[in-house]
Amino acid sequence: MSQEQLIKDCKKKKPKAQEELYRRYARTLFSVALKYARNYSEAEDILQEGFITIFNKVEQFKFKGSFEGWLKRIVINTALQRYRKQSVFEIVNEENIEQVEVEVDEDEISLQFLLQIVQELPDRYRLVFNLYALDGYSHKEIAQMLKISEGTSKSNLSRARIILKEKVENFQKDTTLQASTP
């Protein structure tokens, strides 16, 4: 079944089409949910809520732009809604924002470890880090999505990078120590 026909059938609320849509996109959308979640279980909840929204709003997709991109945006928004209601963001002074870069040796550090340390970030840092560094949103867009100031977005990104840098450096130091111990 073509993607266009699949979408049309989902708009008609056909269960087989909904099942096929889930089968085709669940894996991709779960990886999106996992980036924003604290853990695997929360990512499953986000995915489930995201698909409920997708099935309820599929008629709004007008065949303009990428369908997969539209699906990902719904899952991201579903994840963000979980945190928007909580007061997880701190208002900060923009003058104190530090620019930090994290250097990662891909041969020494697994993707699984990187995902784990991103998931361990406090909510406010994880959300901004994912939106900016992984999904390419601007601070202006993040501020609008999360209902925070651009300065708060920049500060939370900076703090996330500091925490991640410390964790990566500690991991690399521990790995070096273990390798040099006879």
Image (cartoon, rainbow, N blue to C red):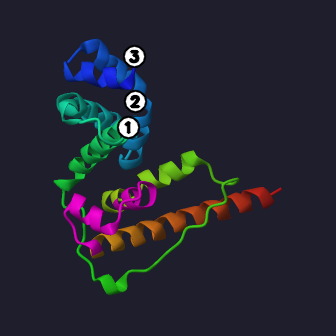
- The residue lying furthest to the bottom in this view is 95
Q: Amino acid type of disc 2? A: Tyr
Would you say residue 42 sits in the magenta stretch?
A: no
Residue 86: which quarter of the image? bottom left
> Which residue is labeled 1 in the image?
68
Disc with the residue nearer the chain's start (2 vs 1): 2
Q: Residue at x 28, y 68 (%)?
A: 140
Q: Residue at x 34, y 36 (%)?
A: 67
Q: Amino acid type of disc 1? A: Glu
Quadrant that contains the N terminus = top left
Residue 133: percent from the left, percent from the top? 44, 60
Quadrant that contains the C terminus = bottom right
Q: Residue at x 32, y 38 (%)?
A: 71
> Callout 1: helix, strand or loop?
helix
Question: Which of these two is toward me, 120 or 146?
Answer: 146
| Residue extent of the magenta highlight | 128-150
Residue 119: percent from the left, percent from the top? 42, 51
Instruction: Find residue 1 and name its label.
Output: 3
Q: CA distance from mark 2 to mark 1?
A: 8 Å
Residue 179: percent from the left, percent from the top? 77, 57
> Which residue is labeled 2 in the image?
25
Circles 2 and 1: CB atoms closer than 8 Å:
yes
> Callout 2: helix, strand or loop?
helix
The crowd level at tag 1 (other Cα within 10 Å; few <14, some 14-19, many 20+) is few
Question: Which of these two is toward me, 74 or 146?
Answer: 74
Disc with the residue nearer the chain's start (2 vs 3): 3
Q: In the image, is residue 150 above or below residue 130?
A: below
Q: CA distance from mark 3 to mark 1?
A: 16 Å
